[in-house]
Each structure stands twice: as structure tokens, then as C-alpha cells.
Amino acid sequence: MLFGTDMDATSSPGLYPLHRCKTLHLVRHAQGIHNVTGEKNHDAYLREEFFDAHLTPLGWQQVDNLRKHVQETGLSKRMDLVIVSPLLRTMQTAVGVFGGEGYKNGMEVPPLMEADAGESHRPAVSSLNCPQFVAVELCRERLGRHPCDRRRSVSEYRPLFPAIDFSLMESDKDVLWEANTRESFEQVAVRGMKFFNWLWTRKEKEIAIVSHSGLLNNTLSAFGSDCRPSVKSEICKNFENCELRSVVIVDRSMMGSDPATTNYAGKIPNGLDLSSDAADGKP
């Protein structure tokens, strides 16, 4: 017998309708200027000089390597949507990895990123033949105290990243970050789960999310309790700079309303179809 009735949830395979699943490609931003000093001295994260930290030259090398990977594996062509935290380092990472080829003046589409945006010393990035890029506040880094996690105004970002959609941003100014209060890990996890639940309002099935270690690590820690320890460890391990980790989320509570587009009802045209098992009284 292939499956025993005493088989527990951690050892049996799972089965779920495809239309109640989404594939998420989770990416932590590449190395930022704050990471270099902050790893040596954590107090450096309190320095105003790291306000809305941009990528380092090494960070851009990490972006180029991940871009090569997503192109070689075909991920870049499968992506339906790119969701990005509205901070310089995440937007630079997102457009560098998932954006189009070099932008040229006269193109009919706006660039994802203008040349040298955020001290990048990089050419403009085209939005041609790319998925939609959407900035979402819910997937920001842990809020408060650290200037590197305070964002600029949307009106400052729009000229730098013309093709990123900022329409979901509720405030031009950063009203979430507070100088003297830092989000608890529990609060970050709650916000992250709210973000994951929000994903079910989107029709897209394969989504890239470019975010931060604090948001990703604290949110993923809530998953994997129904898995073997080795699987939970794989899900919940800390993210490296510019790491990509692909996961599938399942709509167990039926929050989504997407139709089963690949299912086919059968019996068209209608005809007799009683199975031999059904004739024996089996379902």
C-alpha cells in the first residue's frame, strides 16, 4: 500500500488545487552602504549618513550575478509581477535583476531607473518587455530608529524610477518610520503576514518580491511548523544579500478568488460515464 492511514502530516505529500497556490521568488536586496559599516559596528546603523542607503559597487556586482542566474534559469520570462519595498537599495536591486536591457533615449516606454539613480553610477534600465513593478509599503524593512530604513518621499522617487508603480503608496512622505521607536520582531512578523495575505488579492501567479532581511526572516519564521525540521530550517534560514529563494504559498483559508483557469469540466458533450469502482459502490 502506497499511503498508510497512520502517516503523519510531515511525512505524507501534500496536494492542493493549482489555482489556490502562488509561486513567490523572495529576494533580499544586495549589499548596501549601511551593511558594510554596520556589520563591523551595529551602532553605525544609527548614523544619518546612511539615510535610505543605496547599493555599494559590490552590491551591484551581486545584482549582475543574480540577473545572470534568473536569465539562465528562465525565471525572468516567467515572472508576472515584481513587488518591491520602496527604498533605494531594494528598488535598485529589483530593476537591476528583473529589469530590461539598457535604456535608450527615444524609447516609447519610460525607464525603470534613470541613469545614476541613487549614486548607482549605472546606465538607465529599460522597462521594455518587463513585468509590472509595484512599490508596496508592507514589505519594508523593520521600521524605526535606523535612518537607513527611512524612505524618501514618493515625489523624489518617481523621477528616479519612472516605470515603478507607486500608486499603492498612501502617503508621499514617510509617516511610518519613527526616530525613537523601533518595531518589535513580533510586529514585523504581523506586518509580513498581512503582506502575504494581501498577495491573494493579486491575480498574478508567479511573483518576485524584493525586500529586506528583517521582513523576510521574521515573516518566514511563522511558517514550516507542519513540516519536518529540515524543511522548516530551509524555509526559515536567514537571507544573505541578494539571495533568491523560491517558495510556494497555499491558500488554505480560501482568501483568494482566482478561478481554476487550467481545469476543464469534462463530459462535453454529455454522455454516460459511470466508472467500474462506482458500480461497486466506491466513490
Image: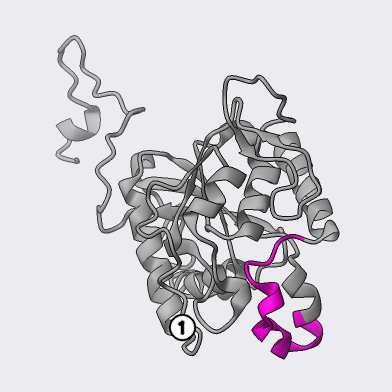
Position of the C terminus, as image quadrant, is top left
The magenta-colored residue range is: 38-55
- Amino acid type for the residue under numbered disc 1: Glu
Compared to residue 187, the image places residue 155 above or below, namely above
Q: Residue 71, image x and y in percent? A: 72, 35
Left or right for 251, reference 27: left
Few, some or many residues within 10 Å of mark 1 (<14, 14–19, 20+): some
Quarter-of-image position of residue 30: bottom right
The residue located at (69%, 44%) in the rendering is 97
Compared to residue 154, the image places residue 51 above or below, namely below
Q: Is residue 228 visible?
A: no
Compared to residue 129, the image places residue 123 above or below, namely below
> Circle 1 sits in a helix, a strand or a loop, which is it?
loop
The residue located at (33%, 50%) in the rendering is 200
Left or right for 137, reference 108: left
The residue located at (58%, 30%) in the rendering is 110
Quarter-of-image position of residue 242: bottom right
Q: Residue 74, image x and y in percent? A: 67, 33
Work out whether residue 12 or residue 1 is closer to the camera in this orientation and state it: 12
Q: Is residue 15 visible?
A: yes
Q: Residue furthest top?
A: 269
The residue to which callout 1 is attached is 183
Work out whether residue 281 or residue 14 is closer to the camera in this orientation and state it: 14
Q: Residue 250, image x and y in percent? A: 38, 54
